[in-house]
Image (cartoon, grey):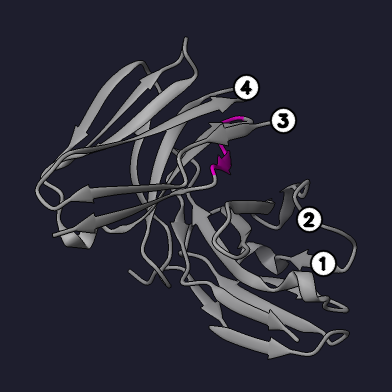
Amino acid sequence: EAGVTQFPSHSVIEKGQTVTLRCDPISGHDNLYWYRRVMGKEIKFLLHFVKESKQDESGMPNNRFLAERTGGTYSTLKVQPAELEDSGVYFCASSQGTSGSNEQFFGPGTRLTVL
Amino acid sequence: GQSLEQPSEVTAVEGAIVQINCTYQTSGFYGLSWYQQHDGGAPTFLSYNALDGLEETGRFSSFLSRSDSYGYLLLQELQMKDSASYFCAVNSGGYQKVTFGTGTKLQVIP
């Protein structure tokens, strides 16, 4: 069974440009999460989809970030315009959400560098 | 809101035992999870405690005390490959919301 995949693995852009990150969750997982880890700090929650609906987007930093999950399958996270402080590793995770542990399966992450 | 505290770094000798503590403050607590992340890799799930007590999975064990808002991860017979960051995480909000701590970087030395 394929795991969570993310694209691209790395992205280097200039301040003010736009970047779109993609996440393909494990097939059948209704829950999809976006996280960000900056400079070895905590894994910070950004938002949570249940199927195509945003369940919780309390972690989104500001309106420069837009996440979508069309059809409840893959998700995109767009940053427009990018700022220097947006640099970090963006992780996507998915889970079935049917077990008490809500074990999350993480993708390999997208390392974003804003110059 | 939720907050979790864990030591930033721990160093231990190969073959030894190490305990990584986690204290939390949260509303709507459902359980405590632990994840491992190697440098440059993705976090991977290790364990979950919903009830007080110790859960054992091979060399790794996890403990929870709900009354103390405290848990720990115990790693036995340390191996060099155990060098990684370890995150505790609180399940809340109908168990589907997971809030991660700041992570503990474990270095295993020969």
Would you place residue A21 above or below residue A12 in this image?
above
Q: Is residue B62 left or right of residue A89?
A: left
Give neighbour class at mark 1: few <14, some 14-19, many 20+ (Cα, 10 Å).
Answer: some
Q: Earlier in the sequence, mark 1 or mark 2?
A: 2
Task: Read off the residue under disc 4.
Answer: B28
Residue A36: x and y in percent read 63, 61
Q: Is residue A79 left or right of residue A38?
A: right
**Residue B1, labelled with which disc?**
3
Instruction: Write the start and end of the magenta stretch as one range.
Output: B94-101
**Residue A65, labelled with which disc?**
1
Image marks 4 and 2: residues in contact by CB distance under 8 Å: no
Specify the subunit that label 4 lies on.
B
Q: Residue at x 55, y 27 (%)?
A: B24
Q: Residue at x 75, y 83 (%)?
A: A19
Both labels 3 and 1 in a single chain: no
Under circle 2, the secondary element is loop
Q: Is residue A14 left or right of residue A22?
A: right
Specify the subunit that label 3 lies on.
B
Under circle 1, the secondary element is strand
Give neighbour class at mark 4: few <14, some 14-19, many 20+ (Cα, 10 Å).
Answer: few
Image marks 1 and 2: residues in contact by CB distance under 8 Å: yes
Reply yes or no: does residue A14 show up in magenta.
no
Q: Amino acid at mark 2?
A: Met
Residue B93 shows up from this direction: yes
Q: Amino acid at mark 3?
A: Gly
In this view, the residue in front, B98 or A30, is B98
Q: CA distance from mark 3 to mark 2?
A: 15 Å
Give neighbour class at mark 2: few <14, some 14-19, many 20+ (Cα, 10 Å).
Answer: some
Task: Read off the residue under disc 2.
Answer: A60
Q: Earlier in the sequence, mark 3 or mark 4?
A: 3
Under circle 4, the secondary element is loop
